[in-house]
Amino acid sequence: MSGPVFKRTRKVVPEDCDELGHVNNVRWLAFVGELAGAHAVRRGSDNDTLREQGSIWIVRRHEIDYHRSALPGESIVEETWVEEMSGARSVRHSRFTREPDGALLVSAITTWAYVDAKTQRPRRIPAEMIERFRRQA
């Protein structure tokens, strides 16, 4: 499938950083989730809409590679795209680079499961949702 890339920027704030002075690993994980959520909203698949339809996305697996540190005040380019959607499974990639020089900071792959909101049992991803994530915005 490999859908189009959703892109935005963020500024690192001191609250994102740990005692070592760089973005904390837990914050990177939050950035991955926030970016996926923003992309879903852009595609008309926000959590409220999904719940009205009786479904939600849950994370099954995160893989995160830390390449370089990000420091307070730095501007980060955030990119995400859906590589695959089939059955009840979606694989999403995220990439974070430093804006001025394009240095790769963090890359992540998240496996999501599309589930029934009440039972949390897997549910087939609707064809119209797959198409929404496949086409350009």
Image (cartoon, rainbow, N blue to C red):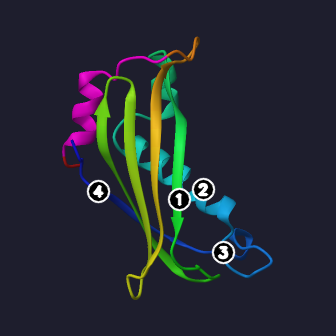
> Residue 69 appears at what percent x and percent y?
59, 79
> Residue 49 appears at what percent x and percent y?
45, 26
User: Which residue in the structure is indicated by mark 4?
Assistant: 5
Q: SS of the residue at dot 1?
A: strand
Q: Residue at x 60, y 62 (%)?
A: 28
Whole-number angstrom distance, CA of label 4 to CA of label 1? 18 Å
Please report contact status of discs 2 and 3: CB closer than 8 Å, yes or no.
Answer: no
User: Which residue in the structure is indicated by mark 2?
Assistant: 29
Q: Nearer the viewer, mark 4 or mark 1?
A: 1
User: Which residue in the structure is indicated by mark 3?
Assistant: 13
Q: Amino acid at mark 1?
A: Ile
Label 4, residues with CA under 10 Å away: few <14, some 14-19, many ≥20? some
Asked whether 67 or 102 is in front, the reply is: 67
Give, as a single range, the part of the protein colored magenta.
122-135
Q: SS of the residue at dot 4?
A: loop
Q: Earlier in the sequence, mark 2 or mark 3?
A: 3
Label 2, residues with CA under 10 Å away: few <14, some 14-19, many ≥20? some
Whole-number angstrom distance, CA of label 3 to CA of label 4? 25 Å
Q: SS of the residue at dot 2?
A: helix
Q: Residue at x 46, y 36 (%)?
A: 112
Q: Earlier in the sequence, mark 2 or mark 4?
A: 4
Tag shown at residue 64 = 1
Q: Amino acid at mark 3?
A: Val
Q: Earlier in the sequence, mark 3 or mark 1?
A: 3
Q: Earlier in the sequence, mark 3 or mark 4?
A: 4
Whole-number angstrom distance, CA of label 2 to CA of label 3? 16 Å
Asked whether 88 or 40 is in front, the reply is: 88
Q: Nearer the viewer, mark 1 or mark 2?
A: 1
> Residue 46 appears at what percent x and percent y?
46, 35
